[in-house]
Image: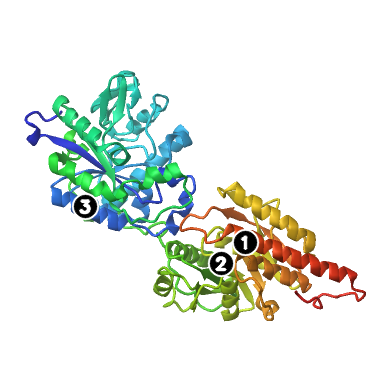
């Protein structure tokens, strides 16, 4: 079906992957699909940027779209179809076929197809695997795709040595017959270098491989092959300003972010040099015009950002405050906002929630973002330190501004999920003054956090456990529930990270009962930690020494002390 004639008349195949920066393979290890809605979505701006570029260059494309986007942001998928591009499926979640049984794969592609057809009112006829490609051991998936009504697949990648010559596959677009069924296969274009087949067709390869090599290989394909070049890119590759997921490894960071700034110019080069159309056009599939009247009228299963400005009408609910100290957290506040909205929805029947955000003298645009996101809300206070004092000082400032007796303190980095507060707050019984989160509890969990950091925290906790009355497994956590009245008279010597532990030790030495909640600690996803390791270690050692001295004095005292009589050094 290849178009014959001179190169200027040939129309090659362009595909665009429509997914968000937080959906992709390099970050999937630390960002599960359950967290996607917490990130600030950039799908709309990046898709519109892509559509405008294609209009400018006179190109049409097949957009491989995640079904999750079709279900949660159907309007942007409909806009792609309205502007004359083909919609195809990239699965529902961003999962490798290795993670799915045949039945799970069938359910995934079926769910994706339904969500995309509902969003566009058009038949979904093509599929590409969400992550990676199909190997020789995965070819059962092609039978399922054919059974489910798909007319073509673009998942087989005949890269490496030998695959393209086996099992009836080819490096060019071809029809695949197996077990009485057939389906078109649309491989990404590659370059034959001796026995080695090298990918050249765009996306990550276009960002990572030498540009001279890519241009030579593509020019050779166009000269030698009668089948069209199959080229692709992702909408997020036109977004060099996208948030950086800090929890990924160095290799994952290179794969995800390297040369993003150059990608638009590289794509423009090929869009200007060659003519591009859709896979459906090349295969001469029946044309289906976009008709908005065919779009399913439905409410998305879950909005991308659940909105809840207030906690709802007044009922018999317990008032609580959530204090959030912030220092240079501009990059995390959008994620935090979405997470807190989700938290409110979870607890709205039990608690009337208000928030106190404390900007601890940030040097970035944290203060501006706090005022943009939270200051207009009736359930939020936004206060500021004129200069940076430390996380413990900011926490106490927030507690003093709180209007409720029950005050929760969390960190802005999201390493402890605020949803865990729902189970922590009821643990603040009448005889308890503080509940602290512990990932070291026998039922706690640590996810992707560097082992050396956990080792330091465990070591410090062992020393604190030796000198304090409340025997806990974790003393350094910033994620807690307090009684405001018990902290009315506290004065800190260390207002930074060590001060968080000093608050707990002060309560302990006052005779307070402190209990632990077995919490899940996760790696920080956005932004960078501000903790200065050596200063923090030194501060902990000083505090432990002071507490040990106080306990020795207590033991030598002839007067027995009762709770509330101890005085903190």
Relative image position of residue 548 (x, y in whole percent):
79, 65
Q: Earlier in the sequence, mark 1 or mark 3?
A: 3
Per the rendering, the mark at residue 536 is 1
Give 214 or 137, whichever is nearer the viewer: 214
Relative image position of residue 52 (x, y in whole percent):
19, 54
Per the rendering, the mark at residue 347 is 2
**Front: mark 2 or 1:** 1
Q: Earlier in the sequence, mark 2 or mark 3?
A: 3
Quadrant in the picture for the C terminus:
bottom right
- Binning the other alpha carbons within 10 Å of mark 1 as few (below 14), some (14 to 19) or many (20 upward) gives some
* Contact (Cβ within 8 Å) of mark 2 with mark 1: no
Classify mark 1: helix, strand or loop: helix
Quadrant in the picture for the N terminus:
top left
- Real-space Cα separation, disc 2 to disc 3, in angstroms: 40 Å
* Contact (Cβ within 8 Å) of mark 1 with mark 3: no
**Front: mark 2 or 3:** 3
Classify mark 3: helix, strand or loop: helix
Per the rendering, the mark at residue 51 is 3
- Real-space Cα separation, disc 1 to disc 3, in angstroms: 50 Å
């Amino acid at each position: 079906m290849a178009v014959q004639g001179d190169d200027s008349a040939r129309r090659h195949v362009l595909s665009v992957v429509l997914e968000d920066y937080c959906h992709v393979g390099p970050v999937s290890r630390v960002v599960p699909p359950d967290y996607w809605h917490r990130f600030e979505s950039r799908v709309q701006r990046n898709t519109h940027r892509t559509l405008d570029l294609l209009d400018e260059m006179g190109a049409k494309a097949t957009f491989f779209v995640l079904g999750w986007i079709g279900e949660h942001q159907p309007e942007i998928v409909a806009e792609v179809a309205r502007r004359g591009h083909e919609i195809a499926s990239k699965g529902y979640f961003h999962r490798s076929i290795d993670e799915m049984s045949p039945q799970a794969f069938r359910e995934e592609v079926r769910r994706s197809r339904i969500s995309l057809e509902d969003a566009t009112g058009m038949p979904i006829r093509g599929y590409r695997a969400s992550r990676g490609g199909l190997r020789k051991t995965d070819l059962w998936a092609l039978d399922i795709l054919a059974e489910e009504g798909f007319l073509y697949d673009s998942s087989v990648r005949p890269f490496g040595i030998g695959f393209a010559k086996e099992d009836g596959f080819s490096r060019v677009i071809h029809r695949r017959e197996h077990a009485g069924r057939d389906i078109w296969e649309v491989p990404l274009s590659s370059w034959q270098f001796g026995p080695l087949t090298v990918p050249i067709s765009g996306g990550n390869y276009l960002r990572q491989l030498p540009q001279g090599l890519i241009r030579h290989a593509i020019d050779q394909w166009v000269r030698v092959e009668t089948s069209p070049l199959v080229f692709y890119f992702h909408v997020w590759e036109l977004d060099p300003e996208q948030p950086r997921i800090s929890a990924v490894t160095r290799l994952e960071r290179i794969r995800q972010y390297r040369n993003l700034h150059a990608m638009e110019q590289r794509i423009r080069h090929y869009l200007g040099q060659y003519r591009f159309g859709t896979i459906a056009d090349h295969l001469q599939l029946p044309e289906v015009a976009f008709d908005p009247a065919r779009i399913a009228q439905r409410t998305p299963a879950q909005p991308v950002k659940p909105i809840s400005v207030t906690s709802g009408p007044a009922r018999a609910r317990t008032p609580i405050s959530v204090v959030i100290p912030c220092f240079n957290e501009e990059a995390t506040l959008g994620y935090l906002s979405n997470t807190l909205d989700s938290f409110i929805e979870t607890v709205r029947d039990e608690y009337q929630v208000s928030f106190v955000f404390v900007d601890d003298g940030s040097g970035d645009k944290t203060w501006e973002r706090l005022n943009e996101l939270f200051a207009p809300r009736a359930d939020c206070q936004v206060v500021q330190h004129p200069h940076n004092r430390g996380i413990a000082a900011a926490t106490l400032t927030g507690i003093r501004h709180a209007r409720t007796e029950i005050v929760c303190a969390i960190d802005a980095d999201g390493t402890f999920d605020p949803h865990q507060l729902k189970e922590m707050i009821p643990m603040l019984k009448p005889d308890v003054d503080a509940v602290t989160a512990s990932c070291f509890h026998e039922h706690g969990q640590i996810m992707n956090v560097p082992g050396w950091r956990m080792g330091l925290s465990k070591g410090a906790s062992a020393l604190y456990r030796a000198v304090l009355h409340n025997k806990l497994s974790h003393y350094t956590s910033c994620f807690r529930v307090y009684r405001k009245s018990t902290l009315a008279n506290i004065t800190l010597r260390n207002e930074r990270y060590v001060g968080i532990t000093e608050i707990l030790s002060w309560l302990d030495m006052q005779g307070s009962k402190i209990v632990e909640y077995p919490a899940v600690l996760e790696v920080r996803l956005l932004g960078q930690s501000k903790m200065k390791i050596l200063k923090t270690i030194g501060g902990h050692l000083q505090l432990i020494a002071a507490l040990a001295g106080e306990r020795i004095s207590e033991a030598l005292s002839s007067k027995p002390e009762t709770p509330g009589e101890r005085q903190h050094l």
